Each structure stands twice: as C-alpha cells, then as structure tokens.
Image: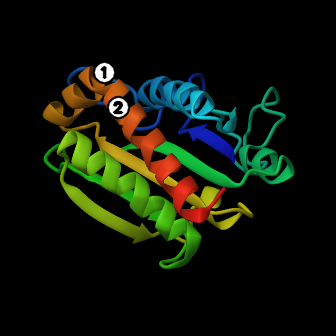
Amino acid sequence: MKVFINPGHDLVYDSGAVNPNSGLRECDVAAKVGNAVKEYLEAAGCECQLLQSDNLYWDSQYADRNVSVVQSANDWPADIFISIHCNAANGQVRGTECEVYQGGGSSAFLAKCIQSQIVSSLGTNDRGINERPGLVVLNSTTMPATLIEMEFIDNDDAAELLMEQWDNFSRAIARGVTDYEQAMGF
C-alpha cells in the first residue's frame, strides 16, 4: 500500500499551534511523529512518501515552496493520505480526534482505525471522527484521507504527553494504517 504522510504545518514558515508555556511547536511534534510513522510503515512493507510544507495546494506565498502537498499525493498516486497535527483550543481541552471530508466510506474507516489505536494505546479522550469538508487536505485529495489531531498542544498535560510519548503516538498511527490495510485487503 502507498501511504502519503503529511506532517502538519511547516518548520520554517508555519509553526501551527504553540504551547504558551513550554513553546512546544505543532510543526516539530508533527515532523517527529511523521518521520517515525514513515519508518514503521516502511518496516511493515508499505511504500511511503512524506512532505511537510505550508504549500498544501499551490497556496504558499513563499517562492521556495514549489511543490504542493495535495498535488504530490494525487500525482504519486497514494492509496491513502494522512495529515498529522496537534489540536489547540483554550488550554483546558484534551483528547484525540480525526477529521474526514465526510462520514462513511473509506476515509471514515481509515480515521476510525487510527483513532481507535491512539485512544486505546495512549488512553487519550476519544473526541471522535468529525466531518471537515473545508480542509484542503481532505477536499482536494483523490484517495481516502484523514487529518489526525493527536492531542491539544496548548494543554500543558497533553503537551507533556506529546513530548514524552511521541513514539507511542507514531506506533499507534502506523498500527491504525496497517489495520486499515489488512481490512481493505491491500
């Protein structure tokens, strides 16, 4: 199975959410987890590509961003697309959720496999699978796609979990992908 991995945001131009107390940046957590997910999936026999960029669909304002994440996934073509993120709200909220373009179908099943592995492995609060049709990584990809919100980076306890348990998040995401792969008969 061909898996396109998009660690959220950008190390240079778009940090994403930042914990106000520790300074932990979403882009750094996503990069670390995304690279580990790639290694685990390749060890399991998946073919992977990884791209972290602020250029999601030819929308970057920076000239050195000449590759689009969505276009790269579509052109490859990937069998599935996962985008890895950390959520943020008000510093109090905790939990894991996965976003899909619409409920039902292969994307929702992929999200459910990943969500189940993270929640059961790390004991995070299950915030469910949510429809987010306005997200470009979900509405412009041509394969089953999900955006994973691992935990709330602006919550100090959740940020600590993200820092200390990043490898367990990586393993859980990879297991969710291989659960999907097995169920779908790849």
**For numbered disc 1, what is the local secondary structure?**
loop
**Vertical side of 173 occupied by 170: above or below:** above
**Residue kind at label 1, given as amino acid type:** Gly
- Which residue is painted at 19% across and 38% down in the image? 155
Which corner quadrant holds the C terminus? Answer: bottom right
Q: Which residue is found at the position 76% from the left and 48% from the top?
A: 73
Residue 54 horizontal side relative to residue 102, left or right: right
Disc 1: which residue: 23
Q: Tell me the quarter of the picture where residue 19 sits.
A: top left
30 left or right of 70?
Answer: left
185 to the left or right of 19: right
Q: How far apart are marks 1 and 2 (CA)?
A: 6 Å
Q: Which colour scheme is used?
A: rainbow
What residue do we see at 18% from left, 53% from top?
125
Residue type highlighted by circle 2: Val
Give the numbered dot on residue 18: 2
List x then y, in percent, for residue 82.
56, 49
Answer with left or right where residue 92 lies relative to residue 6: left
59 to 36, vertically: above or below: below
Q: Is residue 176 visible?
A: yes
